[in-house]
Image: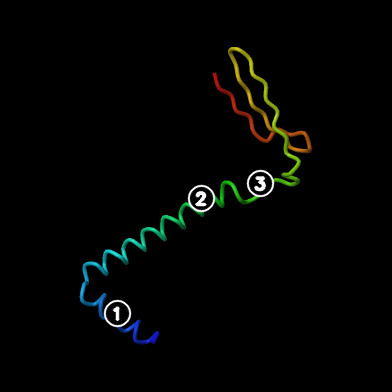
Amino acid sequence: MLIRNLRYAIRSLARAPGFTLTVVLTLAIGIGANSAVFSALNAVLLRPLPLPDSGRLVKLSDRFPRFAASVAHRPDGSVAQRVRTK
């Protein structure tokens, strides 16, 4: 029964090459976009930070009326990131 259904599907796709091309291209674009989004999210959100003891990373921030600063310190006391905006 499965073999008969597969033969029928292949014959149907061979009779309509435009539809077959559209389906194949749609699947290829969808799979490619899904892979690209997952790769970006994996690199940014899912992997741990490339720092020793990254779980102990602390972010301290203060806000002033004319100046905003955000500083993240590593466990050894060194500054990991400093962002200033005016």
Q: Which residue is mark 2?
A: 40
Residue 86: percent from left, percent from top: 54, 18
**Can you say whether 76 is above or below 46 in the image?**
above
Alpha-carbon span between mark 2 and mark 1: 36 Å
Q: Earlier in the sequence, mark 2 or mark 1?
A: 1
Residue 5: percent from left, percent from top: 35, 82
Q: What's the residue type where badge 3 is placed?
A: Leu
**Residue shown at 70%/45% (left/top)?**
51
Q: Residue furthest top?
A: 65
Q: Earlier in the sequence, mark 2 or mark 3?
A: 2
Q: What's the residue type where badge 1 is placed?
A: Ile
**Could you say which is closer to the camera, residue 68 or residue 22?**
22
Alpha-carbon span between mark 2 and mark 3: 15 Å
In the rendered structure, find residue 73 and report the number of the disc placed on it.
none
Label 2 sits on a secondary structure element that is helix
Q: Which residue is mark 3?
A: 49
**Residue shown at 56%/50% (left/top)?**
43
Mark 2 or mark 1, which is nearer to you?
A: 1
Number of residues whose C-alpha sits closer than 10 Å to that of mark 2, classed few (under 14), some (14–19) or many (20 or more): few
Residue 22 located left or right of residue 35:
left
**Can you say whether 69 is above or below 38 in the image?**
above
Q: Earlier in the sequence, mark 1 or mark 3?
A: 1
In the rendered structure, find residue 10 and report the number of the disc placed on it.
1
